[in-house]
Image (cartoon, rainbow, N blue to C red):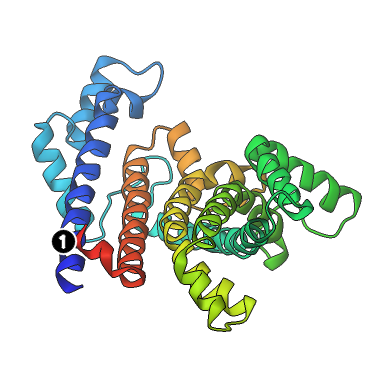
């Protein structure tokens, strides 16, 4: 297990380095950063002065090396627009996005796994059809439309929940449902497919023949084996949620890291965009690494893969 963990950790570090190089390079390839900072109407002299001030006229590898060294030590530079250290700017916003992401993935798992198990136990039944309907609806509805629908119903018509802000836990209810519903269909379908396959395995028949109760067969023997691919999918979905929270945070005016990404992109705030890409990627890599280790613990055969 230790050798497997070290191998996966080394691979994660290599992927993180590649992502940092690509994110830093692609933003430079998108155009002259000095011209983007100077804005419309700037003269060549203004652009040259900005380029010299921020060091854009130096070789790319020198700029990347300096940026990476500082980033490893938690220094992402100064925001061009907010005129604040990028690290503190992101730290203030990240807690909102992380809270939203964790609540959303919890909502998705708590609703999708029992629904997938129930659909697999009674295939083609009314429960299975309801689960399929919920799954199709989740995949068909755009997040922005679903969010606006919830605001109209629960905030404007019924007045049960606030439409925006971060003052209390009630502000996170609708964003959690919208973001979690995005991940729920895939988890539910994978749970159903895994359970259908496992429930016909020999060890399940053996467990029933030994007199094990149906709940014990389902949740101790079957679900433990069927849930292995769900763990990987949940980790991937969590990474997508952090990146995809831009739309949800914009709809519900949650000023988290996702909303900061939208603000920074629209204002050409290069250091903040680079830092956010790197941080979101690090979370994605960390969740994937965690899912690999958890899968290896659940199924020792994966340690030799």
The percent coordinates of residue 157 (x first, y second) are 90, 49
Q: Is residue 293 left or right of residue 163?
A: left
Q: Residue at x 58, y 54 (%)?
A: 192
Quarter of the rendering occupied by the N terminus: bottom left
The percent coordinates of residue 249 (x first, y second) are 59, 48
Q: Is residue 249 left or right of residue 95?
A: right
Residue 36 appears in the figure: yes
211, 138: nearer the viewer: 211
Residue 50 appears in the figure: no
* 112 relative to 278, above or below: below
In this view, the residue farthest toward the right is 157
Q: Residue at x 60, y 52 (%)?
A: 184
The percent coordinates of residue 133 (x first, y second) are 73, 44
262, 102: nearer the viewer: 102
The percent coordinates of residue 103 (x first, y second) are 58, 63
Residue picked out by circle 1: 7
Q: Is residue 81 left or right of residue 105?
A: left
* 148 relative to 191, above or below: above
- Residue 140, picture quadrant: top right
Q: Residue at x 85, y 60 (%)?
A: 160
Quarter of the rendering occupied by the C terminus: bottom left
Identify the element where label 1 is drawn.
helix
* 265 relative to 111, above or below: above
- Residue 57, picture quadrant: top left
249, 121: nearer the viewer: 121
């Amino acid at each position: 297990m230790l050798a497997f963990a070290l191998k996966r950790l080394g691979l994660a570090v290599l992927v993180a380095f590649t992502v940092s190089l690509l994110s830093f390079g692609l933003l430079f390839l998108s155009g002259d950063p000095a011209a983007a900072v100077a804005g419309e109407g700037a003269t060549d002299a203004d652009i040259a002065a900005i380029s010299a001030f921020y060091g854009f006229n130096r070789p790319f590898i020198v700029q990347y090396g300096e940026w990476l060294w500082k980033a490893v030590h938690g220094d992402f530079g100064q925001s061009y627009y907010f005129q604040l250290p990028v690290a503190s700017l992101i730290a203030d916003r990240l807690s909102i996005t992380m809270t939203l992401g964790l609540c959303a993935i919890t909502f998705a798992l708590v609703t999708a796994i029992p629904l997938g198990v129930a659909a697999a136990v009674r295939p083609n039944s009314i429960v299975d059809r309801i689960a399929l309907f919920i799954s199709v609806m989740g995949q068909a509805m755009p997040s922005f439309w679903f969010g606006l629908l919830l605001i109209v119903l629960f905030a404007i018509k019924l007045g049960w929940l606030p439409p925006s802000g971060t003052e209390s836990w009630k502000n996170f209810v609708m964003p959690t449902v919208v973001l979690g519903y995005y991940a729920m269909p895939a988890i539910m379908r994978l749970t159903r497919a895994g359970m259908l396959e496992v429930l016909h395995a020999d060890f399940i028949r053996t467990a029933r023949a030994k007199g094990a109760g149906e709940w014990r067969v389902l949740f101790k023997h079957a679900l433990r084996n069927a849930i292995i691919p769900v763990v990987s999918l949940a980790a991937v979905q969590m990474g997508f949620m952090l990146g995809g929270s831009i739309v949800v945070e914009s709809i519900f005016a949650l000023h988290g890291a996702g909303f900061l990404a939208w603000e920074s992109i629209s204002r050409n705030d290069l250091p903040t965009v680079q830092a956010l890409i790197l941080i979101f990627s690090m979370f994605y890599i960390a969740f994937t690494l965690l899912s690999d280790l958890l899968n290896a613990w659940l199924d020792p055969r994966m340690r030799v893969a």
